[in-house]
Image (tube, rainbow, N blue to C red):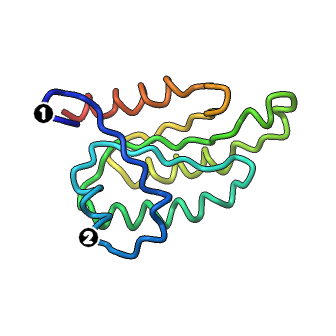
Amino acid sequence: RTPDGLLQIWEVMHMSGVRSLDLYKNYLEDADGMLLVYDCRYPRTIEGLEAWYTKALSLSNKQIPLVVVANKIDLYIDNLEKFDRNEGLNFALKLSSASIYETPFIESSAKLGINISRLFNVLIDGIRNDL
């Protein structure tokens, strides 16, 4: 968030090759919210996401609103019964139980634009409610 109320979005997950904790800390210490996005084709990617979140939490020293996002749902559009949402739901519940905030779980497709506005609106609402 900027002084004029604008939302700044930083994508830091692909910086995993960066070894400087100070660089991560610069991005995370002033964060007001976080989207935790995983590839729904590979629910085990949540394990890496959980490790990354634990690291982020230790660097920011504060709890912030979170949203767990299962991305690439478009790959299941013709066969949604094959999509297993339990891993994502359980991860969101686990984060909720360890936080002062409820952690929503949202299914999305960046490719097709499914729930993209919704996931940002849910995060922004969580941030606004925290002010």
Q: Vertically, is 66 above or below 127?
A: below
Relative depth, front residue between 130 and 15: 15
Q: Vertically, is 52 above or below 1?
A: below
Give the numbered dot on residue 3: 1
Residue at horizontal 26%, vertical 28%?
A: 128
Relative depth, front residue between 79 and 129: 79
Horizontal placement of 81 versus 126: left or right? right
Residue type beneath disc 1:
Pro
Say how many tags the image has.
2
Residue at horizontal 36%, vertical 51%?
A: 99
Instruction: Give the CA distance from mark 1 to mark 2.
Output: 23 Å
The mark nearer the N terminus, 1 or 2, is 1
Quadrant of the snapshot with the C terminus: top left
Q: Place residue 62 in its image quadrant.
A: bottom left
Secondary structure of the residue carrying numbered label 1: loop
Disc 1: CA contacts within 10 A as few (<14), some (14-19) or many (>=20): few
Residue at horizontal 49%, vertical 67%?
A: 51
The residue where tag 2 is placed is 22
Residue at horizontal 56%, vertical 52%?
A: 91
Horizontal placement of 99 versus 87: left or right? left
Secondary structure of the residue carrying numbered label 2: helix
Disc 2: CA contacts within 10 A as few (<14), some (14-19) or many (>=20): few
Quadrant of the snapshot with the N terminus: top left
Residue type beneath disc 2:
Asp
- Indicate the position of residue 104 as horizontal and vertical percent values: 49, 37
Q: Looking at this rendering, what residue extends furthest in the bottom direction?
A: 19
Give the numbered dot on residue 52: none
- Indicate the position of residue 129 as horizontal and vertical percent values: 26, 29
